[in-house]
Image (cartoon, rainbow, N blue to C red):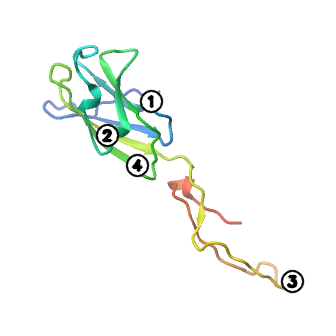
Amino acid sequence: HVAPVCLSAQHGHPARYSGHLAENSPAGTPVEGVRIPLLIAGCPGADPDQSLSGNYASDFKLVYNNEHLNHLVLVSAKPLDREFIAMYELKVELSPRCQRRPAAIQVEVSDRNDNIPRFTFGNKTVQVDELTPLGTELARFDAKDGDAQRNGRVTFY
């Protein structure tokens, strides 16, 4: 378990948080590394979800931490797809009585091997003469996989 880290402590600047979440995690999964402190436990009258903005902010929700009511936790509102959005930039801005300063949050969606390789030119039929020497190249195929790094590597045998 990694403790949340505020990346900016300069007065007047937004507090910066960086977190990550594995793609296809169920709705309600907490974003690792994002726990936002509040000045008042539970912050009565505040609507945390109305304070969340940014690209596709509706993919997330802010909830009160069950163990520490003076913290908000960022959770997914639905399973996320890294191939659609790999990085989110969000902002949390509550009233000054609840939050000392706005929070800027960067969420990286980590890849899972959830895509199958696709052959780019469809099916090929290869006919081989029985006298063809062993080791002769018979055909070339090209395939693509939408996953990242090693999850997107395609190997032919």
Measuring 46% from the left and 47% from the top, which residue is drawn there? 81
Give the mark nearest the N terminus, 3 or 4. 4
Residue 77: horizontal and vertical position, in percent? 41, 34
Quadrant of res 64: top left
Q: Is residue 127 above or below residue 17?
A: below
| Residue pointed to by mark 4 | 86
Q: Is residue 146 above or below residue 71?
A: below
Dot 3: few (<14), some (14–19), or many (≥20) neighbours within 10 Å?
Answer: few
Give the mark nearest the N terminus, 1 or 4. 1
Dot 1: few (<14), some (14–19), or many (≥20) neighbours within 10 Å?
Answer: some
Nearer to us: label 3 or label 2: 2
Cα–Cα span, label 3 and label 2: 61 Å
| Residue pointed to by mark 2 | 57
Cα–Cα span, label 1 and label 3: 59 Å
Dot 2: few (<14), some (14–19), or many (≥20) neighbours within 10 Å?
Answer: some
Cα–Cα span, label 1 and label 4: 18 Å
Dot 4: few (<14), some (14–19), or many (≥20) neighbours within 10 Å?
Answer: some
Amino acid type, label 1: Gly
Q: Is residue 13 above or below residue 87?
A: above
Amino acid type, label 4: Ala
| Residue pointed to by mark 3 | 130
Relative placement, left or right, of 18 versus 23 is left
